[in-house]
Amino acid sequence: MININNLHACVETADGEAKEIIKGLNLEIKSGEVHAIMGPNGVGKSTLSYVLSGRDGYNVTDGSVELDGVDLLKLNPEERAALGVFLAFQYPVEIPGVNMNVFLKAAVNALRKQRGENELDALGMLKLIKGKSKELGISDDMMRRTVNVGFSGGEKKRNEILQMAMLEPKFCILDETDSGLDIDAIKVVADGVNKLRSPDRSFLVITHYQRLLDYIKPDIVHVMADGKIVKTGGPELALELEEKGYAEFLKAEEQEKAA
Amino acid sequence: MAATEKTIAQVEKLSGGYDAGFYTEIESEKAPKGLNEDIIRFISAKKKEPEWMLERRLKAYYHWLKMPEPDWAKVKFTPIDYQDAYYYAAPKSMENAPDTIDDVDPKLLDTYEKLGIPLREQEMLSGVKNRSAVAVDAVFDSISVATTFKKELKKYGIIFSSLSEAIQNHPELVKKYMGSVVPYSDNKHACLNSAVFTDGSFVYVPEGVRCPMELSTYFRINEMNTGQFERTLIIADKGSYVSYLEGCTAPMHDERQLHAAIVEVIAHEDAEVKYSTVQNWYPGDFNTGAGGIYNFVTKRGLCEGRNSKISWTQVETGSAITWKYPSCILKGDNSQGEFYSVAITNGYQQADTGTKMIHIGKNTKSRIISKGISAGHSDNTYRGVVKVMPGAENARNFTVCDSLLIGNDCGAHTVPYVESRNNTATLGHEATTSKISEDQLFYCMQRGISKEEAIALIVNGFAKEVLQHLPMEFAVEAQKLVAISLEGSIG
Ligand SMILES: Nc1ncnc2c1ncn2[C@@H]1O[C@H](COP(=O)(O)OP(=O)(O)OP(=O)(O)O)[C@@H](O)[C@H]1O
Ligand SMILES: [Mg+2]
């Protein structure tokens, strides 16, 4: 599915300088797998998600990213979306004036158009939205409001999962979708994700908390530090992290390497 | 695609996608260039006008000569050389007014067809365009080419014709109402119009009649170096209702062109007039600002009777310079005025637009919703006046002015004046300025929506409150126009 090889990437800072954040990252996720990335604040997890989805101002200086053999780095964000890249944002963006229903329709049809499929009509769209939002416990009222405006933290995250369910992507990145959610909401979101798990869909779940991984069982857990993956293991790695905390864990890692 | 076609398509794209920019090759009769008393006599003679009309024109002309240009709007342009333009241009084929639509030069009909305005009634009714019937008065340069559904409307006693015809057929109405809301001495542009106006539409809806269809006028400037000076007069008698829409386009010429129009609306007791405009005059070159229309328009409505209502809705996307303040004089007790506006500027366009609400009667109400969108190197100003006169007990106004900026090189300005001379008035004002952020665009693009589409989505959302006041038949087109006029606004 996705192959990330020796990826180096910079962000443009406010004073126009390039600052390297991703420093030689390698990652391979196979079809159907769920990988989790954990790591301290500021190591570049969100930056990685932006680089993968093609955000302006995040420039790749070395390495490669392929999705099913297609060079993602050559494509603009909407083309990547059409190929099946989906990012559930750590901070979903408010778009005043634009109705949720209108936004979802625009997104679904934009993707269908790019994929050479027929656009859905108003009725088909309404059915799709109704079905998916019901599964996620999202009220019709919320669908009539404008995109993320005045949504609570939990509603925003749920809305990201709704969009994921509607757009049926191949490769989903969830950036701290659990933060700000109460325990019940985590279950709803995890349920939503689990329903989408399938042999031809992969997930990259960025989180700080082991708890989410109780509900979304990862196949592989990575630890990220200073722009790289520093350790890869099974679900038990998350438990170990939780117990020790990042600082101690990373120190132990370093000592092990030095030895 | 052939290379030349490709170039044309590219150029069109760069010009902000102005697709009404074609020129109709047609033989045209013009007045000699320039402006003097003879030209006014020429126009009046062409229209076979009665003596009283010519006298009014000349009075306006001599007043105009002495009037200063208005200088308070936030627009910059080289002074107009009034002698370097034609004041009358009409297709030769219209010299002897055709009796039926079948006698009209097919080239003219094709022009309107191309603009999406079929003029043959049966075509409109056959529902090709999938919309209900709309009666159209089609004005081409200085002359009305055709007016549809006249007979149908006559059954209701409604008069819908070109103003030139109305001067011939209903002189008593024209004499009484023309100039009663916008006097010739109102401002320099209106005064010029009063002297040289050529054509426009006339509507009279009799007492108690609800006009059964949308009425509309489609203004087309075709010739180079000609000004267009149309004039519209709408009278809604007691208890009547009419919804009227005007649309405007022009070819891409390199020279600036002057358009100075007057619209007067009179609503009697319990009458309601809904006036909508979709203004898409050629905005000038997208990259240099060369050419384009100077759109200097005086629009004013008089709520003469009790419980009368006038509502202005405008979507302003075109013109190099827009100077326009559709206003309401709320004279009748309980009368209401509304102004809903979307003004979009891109490239090097400048818009200074807004409204005036003058509260004179008791319990008068006004509502102003203005949405300004600026992109490129453009400048967009909302300028409004709310005035409450001493006798206007319990007057109420509510104003919302929102500005949206796209990019860093454009400007948005809000200049609201409030003058209250009665302390029972309730006045509310809200204003916001926002910007389309990179975050918003990326969020949309991540969902598969292209940047241009994302801008259109956000802008249409921003303008929704205004667009929903347009007649249904035009709302969809207006949304598309909003999208087109913002093409190229982001790199
Ligand atoms: N535009 C920018 N200009 C300067 N520094 C930036 C910019 N964008 C990101 N950074 C820096 O890059 C680093 C990585 O940020 P990123 O948001 O990817 O971290 P993260 O791992 O997602 O952290 P968290 O767990 O807090 O979400 C941080 O030090 C951040 O300050
Ligand atoms: Mg982050």
Image (cartoon, grey):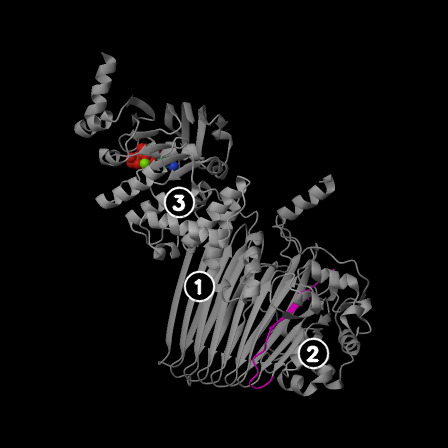
Count the labels in the image: 3
Residue B3 lies left or right of residue A103; in this view the side is right
Name the image quarter holding the C terminus of chain A: top left
Q: Residue at x 48, y 25 (%)?
A: A69
Q: As rendered, which of B165 and B359 lies closer to the eye?
A: B165
Chain bearing mark 2: B
Tag 1 and tag 2, C-beta contact below 8 Å: no
Residue to which mark 1 is pinned: B401
Residue to which mark 3 is pinned: A163
Q: Are marks 3 and 1 on the same chain?
A: no
Using the rendered image of the protein, determine whether residue A133 is visible from the camera's viewpoint: yes
Q: Amino acid at mark 2?
A: Lys
Majority SS type along the magenta span: loop
Q: Position of residue A36 (x, y in %)?
A: 31, 30
Does the segment drawn in magenta span residue B207? yes
Q: Position of residue A244 (x, y in %)?
A: 17, 27
